[in-house]
Image (spheres, helix red, strand yellow):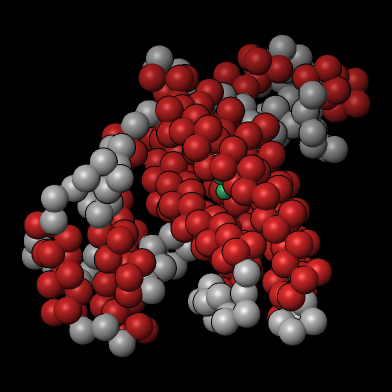
Amino acid sequence: MELDVSRTVADYAVAYPPSKRVFEKLGIDYCCGGKKSITEACESKGVALEDLAELLKAEEARPQNGEAVELDFASMSLAALSDHIVRCHHNFTREEDARIVALLNKVCSVHGRNHPELFEVQRIFGELKSELETHMLKEERMLFPYISLMESSFNFGMPRPPAPFGSTRNPVAVMISDHDKAAEMLVEIRNLTNEFTVPGDGCVTYRTLFSALEGLEKDLHQHIHLENNILFPKAIEMEDAGTVSDARALQEQACGIHEHGHEHSHGHAHSHGHAHGHAQANGCGCGCNH
Ligand SMILES: [Fe+2]
Ligand SMILES: [Fe+2]
């Protein structure tokens, strides 16, 4: 594979998934930091471009066993991809979060005196867990269902359905900022644990805890990669492909209150807004600017 240094790390991770193994080995972030060009990413990690090209070539030549073969996420429908993210990554995160909390409690109580940094890991992990719970609920209850609905409208040649949050870019920006925060917390945990190195006096539970934390970090990298680099950009691309004026007409029809073109003839927001569950305080929230 010829290395195209002008492309981003995320481009490589999406177009050639085995490259993620190489990036992981080199400590190059392909999810939240995926927008960096290959040149920038190599410079920031002190990696020579020729070395990266060699490693990618070797990865390409390596027989891909079952573990290394990845589904073709870039070609999946957005509904199928969202479903995969929830089934595989959200569920895994919830299970592991609960397991890690129990392990942390045990390891802190036994080893906390000799390794006080464990309490800091426990504090940060508690925050990460709580942030992730809220974040995943926002995706599952609001953003993902909307993306699937927009995709089916798009496939039927219909305009974009109305959304309480306006453009998909708005919730996507919030989700990406949440991802950045989670990634920072993961880095803090990695640093505090000296890259998940179990100390000499560490017991089996200590080892289990560190391997669970490292496993969760790895899974979150893939999880965030699928959202930041595939699902979200494709959803925005789909939204941009729709026609705004048509979407607005449909929104007004769906609202059922407005008579298009008679902006001052109908009632105010409080008289009908709640009937549709619209969240905006001024106007009905259906996107028709009343
Ligand atoms: Fe997610
Ligand atoms: Fe997310």
Q: Residue at x 65, y 15 (%)?
A: 254
Q: How far from the left and from the top, in percent, is residue 95?
A: 64, 43
Q: How far from the left and from the top, in percent, is residue 53?
A: 14, 71
In this view of the protein, can residue 17 be seen by the observer? Answer: yes
Q: Is residue 184 left or right of residue 61?
A: right
Q: Is 191 in front, or is 118?
A: 118
Q: Is 85 in front, or is 286?
A: 85
Q: Is 2 in front, or is 52?
A: 52
Q: Residue at x 65, y 20 (%)?
A: 252
Q: How far from the left and from the top, in percent, is residue 45?
A: 35, 83
Q: Is 21 in front, or is 154?
A: 21
Q: Residue at x 13, y 79 (%)?
A: 50
Q: Is residue 233 above or below residue 129?
A: above
Q: How far from the left and from the top, in percent, is residue 162?
A: 61, 27
Q: Is residue 21 left or right of residue 185?
A: left
Q: Residue at x 30, y 45 (%)?
A: 67
Residue farthest to the bottom, as pictured: 46
Residue farthest to the right, as pictured: 270
Q: Quadrant of the C terminus?
A: top right
